[in-house]
Amino acid sequence: MNLKKFISLALFSLFAVNIQAQEGYELWLDYKEVQDRTIEKNYAAFLNNVDIIGNSSTIQAIKEELQLAREGFGFDDSETGGDSKLIIGVQSKLPSSLRNQAKTENLEEEGYNITSLKNGKTILISANSEVALLYGTFGLLREMQQQNDISNLKIEEKPKIQKRVLNHWDNLDRTVERGYAGFSIWDWHLLPELIKPEYKDYARANAAIGINGTVLTNVNSNALILTPHYIEKVKALAEVFRPYGIQVYLTARFSAPIELGDLDTADPLNEDVKQWWKNIADEIYAEIPDFGGFLVKADSEGQPGPFQYDRTHVDGANMLAEAVAPHDGIIMWRAFVYSEEDPDDRAKQAYDQFIPYDGNFADNVLVQVKNGAIDFQPREPFHPMFGAMPDTPLMMEFQITQEYLGFSSHLVFLPKLFEEVLDEDTYADGKNSTVAKVIDGTNSNKKLTGIAGVANIGTEKNWTGNPFGQANWYGFGRLAWDPYMDSEEIAQEWLRINFSNEEDFVKTMTDLLIESREAVVNYMTPLGLHHIMATSHHYGPGPWVDDLGRPEWNPVYYHKADKNGIGFDRTSSGSNALAQYAKPLEEKYSNPETTPEKYLLWFHHLSWDYEMDNGKKLWDNIALHYQKGVEQVEEMQATWNKMEQYVNEREFKKTSMLLEIQLKEAKWWRDACLSYFQQFSEMELPAGVPEPEHNLEHYKSIDRPYAPGINPSW
Amino acid sequence: MNLKKFISLALFSLFAVNIQAQEGYELWLDYKEVQDRTIEKNYAAFLNNVDIIGNSSTIQAIKEELQLAREGFGFDDSETGGDSKLIIGVQSKLPSSLRNQAKTENLEEEGYNITSLKNGKTILISANSEVALLYGTFGLLREMQQQNDISNLKIEEKPKIQKRVLNHWDNLDRTVERGYAGFSIWDWHLLPELIKPEYKDYARANAAIGINGTVLTNVNSNALILTPHYIEKVKALAEVFRPYGIQVYLTARFSAPIELGDLDTADPLNEDVKQWWKNIADEIYAEIPDFGGFLVKADSEGQPGPFQYDRTHVDGANMLAEAVAPHDGIIMWRAFVYSEEDPDDRAKQAYDQFIPYDGNFADNVLVQVKNGAIDFQPREPFHPMFGAMPDTPLMMEFQITQEYLGFSSHLVFLPKLFEEVLDEDTYADGKNSTVAKVIDGTNSNKKLTGIAGVANIGTEKNWTGNPFGQANWYGFGRLAWDPYMDSEEIAQEWLRINFSNEEDFVKTMTDLLIESREAVVNYMTPLGLHHIMATSHHYGPGPWVDDLGRPEWNPVYYHKADKNGIGFDRTSSGSNALAQYAKPLEEKYSNPETTPEKYLLWFHHLSWDYEMDNGKKLWDNIALHYQKGVEQVEEMQATWNKMEQYVNEREFKKTSMLLEIQLKEAKWWRDACLSYFQQFSEMELPAGVPEPEHNLEHYKSIDRPYAPGINPSW
């Protein structure tokens, strides 16, 4: 091939690459060409001269990743910088001269150092395990993706939480409960033979942000996953994930001993049942020695559990814990429980069911608690269980998939939501006992810690549907590693890596991301309103719904709007859910005047003309918040339209189209909710809030039976 | 960027391109780099100097396609060949000097010429419509993809069938009935706002093979698709497809007038019902002026239809035909009907129900008939309706998705199957009245003609899951254009375009493709056996199933194995289905001695020791065919392993993994069926056929409730 021909070809190839990258499949592992020649030379000098100690599959993964980075960044193999060198090795295998340069005593198994030595001519990544070296490698590449100065690195990183897992609510038929990015990436039918490239790329992406576990199956679980036919498939995935430090977990259906046809009881204190689960565990561990354990949803929303046998959560969890304990497995036992018989405020029930058992769970049990006491709302006060079980390790459950936040078409930057929860003070151990400190074990010095994110991943070409959905997966991983990280920092990192390092872009878009969370609160559930979404799929507004089988499934249960006002009285004059919080909070939130406005209607039922801080009536404030939410989306659109120069064409267009949907739906929310509430307030809309386009009957008549994410088995 | 840097970058870019192409997303529009410098220069000279007359969206599509081809082939813009030129124009707009060079009188709307003029220095693509120019452009590019000589082109092409449509059995929840390539590519929830790039690429791929219609929804249909909420979404797709000459069709649920809440009857002779459908048609055509019409499955497998009102298929079809006739729409009325009350041979029922109405259907009705009288089996004799309704246009329905042929994991080249059906002689109008002549209108000179393929397309990154599934989509399109085309020629075309023009590869793999169809017949249903698949999902063998609600749903109904023998007696001593065929066939097939062995047990019940042509007993032949099928898959594996050099890495590996599944399942079929039938034959397996690995109880116990492709609404 002559040079001219070659260059011509190369030009066309660049075009094709562009199209590929534009789909977003690469996630944050898109090592974009480094344009600045000085930076490029500097980075290339290190990546082109690498010493890696070892030869395991994890070391192999590090080598492959470095090669992909070299290719993506555009480094020519011949670019070396004299004696520049990158050394990667487990501490115990390093030459002693290097070993003393960067101590790893405090890094435990997963921490790493990235240290500049010899006046910056050598970069050393050291750690106590190979997986930690992989984390360190990704850490260094992240610096390069952001084009940071690497001349004097002294990074010491160690995850603050041990079990950092994704929860996939994926069914065996590949539907995904609350999945808005297509269908399950686990192609069970063709496993174990067909190993799709996606499986490895999933592992790479997760390892790059420090996620070390994945629950493959839905919490509304299917016992068949425990049969040899499926374990063989799970094993195949586990083998792909292992080099990347990712453990596989499954959901355990409590009634499995009966459903798989072996026993006629699932009583956790029955010896045969205990033995049955031990056998299952043994069978799984024989195939998957590093199997993580089970996640269990029991006695919740129709799932079987120990209650049927007059046993407790402790009985159930500890029985399973015993089965996996010999193999170092753990049980993640969900606290998302509420009873159809219990007429008490749903927000109180999990606390009431679990608190009495504090200290009774086995050492390898984590109680997994959703961030709020209801269910993954646009905004909730932190769950009162956090801080209230000093002798029980509580695992945080966030939802990355946007069940109640507009599905995958709404741009909502969730790290901002996660951060808000993590930063809340529980006062459990005096002032500054934040939720983060509860779950990372600082409070009460817990030995087992964990955090889970319900995944937003599916078969969409870019994994998450909305290009910005990737930021939520990314941000969850970063916060799982360090729950004290600032959401703005996460936004900046992701924007730089994913789109552009141009400061104008990064600054403007960081502001947009940070504000996006408040926007969705405003146009859906401002001022502490919650759970007023349409039935079942939770797509769109449904504040009028009052005819569902269980009271606490109805939106009217949550907003309690009537002629006298709106809001859920959770003070002592109401459900007294407030009593579940520590005294300082209870006192503060008991009085509407001292309650933060963002939680106002969560804790108080107030009259429509209740006067708020801004001097305006509650009704006016509600209406203005809805309007503000719509305007925020309009601003997001305007901002995005200015970003075209920084973003590839396909993602630019796709985001523009999705923002169209978001704006349409923000208006739908505003108009439907205000039409509905206005019946009770009987007050005019304040200036600046337009009359709804349609009447209330129109909004009530909207029916979307095929909105995605509904479990077909329901 | 300096040159060195540029070249380095380019090299890495090529690597990345490779990965993209390796996923197979590009289908047959992957314009691979032309390596031969002479050929490349020659092609580039034409594609770099193009005159296109016009500026419509279709002309725009032609320009875009040529640009993509230039980029893919690797043509440098500067490569021109002096006065080499490609001219593309509708005949009436060409200068008169050119108009006389290539006549288009006989090309009708969709035919095209590709003609070399001026000693080969000019290539002219001419036609009577712009869509035909697009077909011609794809035709020329196909020549280039195969690196054919283009110095003296005189191609005149015109489709022999008018309506060439894909049938998507896609549900509104994105599940796909009998879908084995993921889920529906129609993302209804995000339409009409989100227009995915896939929609356009789908249109390009179809136009490239001449497909001009697509039925978006499942024949087991949902009335909601007819509501304005969905029509708006359908319209958005229609607008993407329109420049590519692809009309959109929908399935019409016969009971829609009731289900959508407007009427209390769906009686096709009721005036309100007629008016209701006219209104629906008017509403759709107001949004989509080129809407194609409706496909209807009525009074079949539980679908509503005219029978409930004591009306006929004619009443139902003609009522709908009247509604769409003012808009030039058509009705495709399916003949796949069999009754649970009718105890007669299921293979006979469609014929009996339809033949009496020959000549009674409205002019814009096509009766859509599956290729065989049962249901898309690995092999069936042609459906006796072909040739038996001289005054009714019959539309062929093939199934591209492999419901009964191993799903997407089995490599089976279906054009070989399609060709076998099309080439069969119906004797309807004397000798040589092939099925092809029935459906292309040659016989009886029918004015409306059509062919449908049930799509194998889904959300998989390469559209079809199995890389070779693409060949079946491609081949269906080519045969729809020209039902007389040779399946070997199709195989060669596709192999060249998709993988490599190396003769060794093309020849070897053509043989493999052609043989692959006989392999699946051998290991599933040799010698005329049929419908012995497992229940519901049809995944794997289930010859023992005898407990389903309706007799004709049970495999035992079809093979009738007992101590005395095996096979379905469809001669006059049995169901006499044979009487539905023309005399020469009836006579030939009445005698097992003159019945082609491939149909033997379709038409005859024979004793296990019946002696066949090879001197061996029937039992031995059955067993040897099963064994042969397994060996054929083993040979396919061996052949494939030699092809690594010609195929990209990802598709090579993927195919290898899938062949592993195919081999495992071929053995499963062989062992399960022989174990089962051996109970009745009570004969030893012949030499060369290994004993089954497990006993019959094992095979009967295999349960795969989550095999893909089951309609969740069932």
Image (tube, coloured by chain):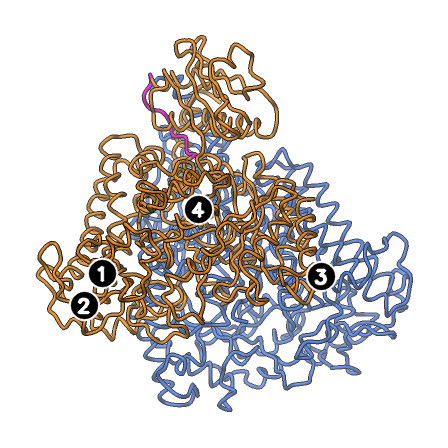
Chain colours: A blue, B orange
Camera-nearest label, 4 or 2 = 4
* Residue at mark 3 to residue at mark 4: CA–CA distance: 49 Å
Classify mark 4: helix, strand or loop.
Answer: loop
Mark 2 or mark 1: whose residue is earlier in sequence = 1
Residue underneath mark 4: B390
Q: Amino acid at mark 3?
A: Ile
Is B127 drawn above or below residue B596 in the view shown?
A: above
- Residue B203 within the magenta-colored segment of the rendering: no
Q: Amino acid at mark 1?
A: Lys
Q: Do discs 3 and 2 share a chain?
A: no
User: Which numbered marker is on residue A121?
Assistant: none
* Residue at mark 1 to residue at mark 3: CA–CA distance: 52 Å
- Residue B34 within the magenta-colored segment of the rendering: yes
| Front one among A533 and B189 | B189
From the viewer's perspective, tell me whether residue B672 is left or right of residue A366.
left
Q: Return the chain for callout 2.
A: B
Q: Position of residue B85 (x, y in %)?
A: 47, 14
Q: Do discs 4 and 2 share a chain?
A: yes
Residue underneath mark 3: A702
Is A514 drawn above or below residue A370 in the view shown?
A: above
CB under 8 Å between discs 4 and 2:
no
Q: Residue at x 64, y 35 (%)?
A: A644
Res. B515 image quadrant: top left
CB under 8 Å between discs 3 and 2:
no
User: Which numbered marker is on residue B693?
Assistant: 2
Residue underneath mark 1: B667
- Do we see residue B422 in this rendering? yes
In magenta, the rendered stretch is B29-38
* Residue at mark 3 to residue at mark 2: CA–CA distance: 57 Å
